[in-house]
Image (cartoon, rainbow, N blue to C red):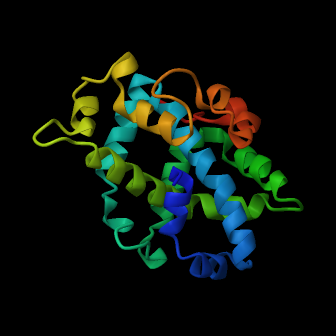
Amino acid sequence: MSAIDDILADIPMDQLAAQLGVDEATAEQATRQAIPALLGGLQANAEDPAGAMSLAGALGDHPSDLIDGGVNLDQIDANDGEKIVGNIFGPNQDQVAQTLGGNLGGQAGGLIRRLLPILAPIVLAYLTKRITGQRQGGSQNPLDSILGGGATGSSNPLNDLLSSMLGGGPAGGRAAQSSGDPILDMLGGLLGAGRR
């Protein structure tokens, strides 16, 4: 199962659709556009050492219990989600939403703009679960190695994980260039505009 399907499986689509005021098919289609964009933006940020440290700190603040046993949308802090989206996309938030919305036809940019802050904490909780799940026995938490400055260049576990989730190999290249994902290719340089 792909990371996107894995995240989708934890989201109660009927509740999400009701919250957004759309039907379930539209909510799922929009979510399938938004998750790769969030992951791609996170990866673009993680390629920068300061961005990787900032992301590791954010993951430390977003434990995986948000998604354990399925997501309860009532537990999502929309203000927190707004901050995460701002950190990922910087001043390009609206442009990213409009670009993704264009794929859905009509005026779906507003829908994506409302959806991103809901999904951002879910994506971070999922990443936390994946990263902490990679620990073997007593080995160091990968987040600790990033925060401690131990992750540089190709030994950045966050970048490797995000790249593999987006369908690329571990490490190497910007997500938008190496993913082969049309959403990421289309967003191109808009991703990771909030890095630092």
Q: Residue at x 54, y 31 (%)?
A: 44
- Residue 10, image x and y in percent? 47, 68
- 48 or 4: nearer the eye? 4
Q: Residue at x 64, y 54 (%)?
A: 34
Residue found at the very far right of the displayed protein: 106
Tag count in the figure? 0
- 93 or 171: nearer the eye? 171
Q: Residue at x 73, y 34 (%)?
A: 185
Q: Is residue 90 above or below residue 107?
A: above
- 33 or 42: nearer the eye? 33
- Residue 89, image x and y in percent? 60, 41
- Residue 133, image x and y in percent? 28, 49
Q: Residue at x 77, y 57 (%)?
A: 109
Residue found at the very far front of the displayed protein: 1
- Residue 110, image x and y in percent? 75, 62
Judge from the rendering whether residue 142 lies leftward or rightward of residue 12; answer left or right.
Answer: left
Residue found at the very far top of the displayed protein: 153
Judge from the rendering whether residue 168 lies leftward or rightward of residue 102; answer left or right.
Answer: left
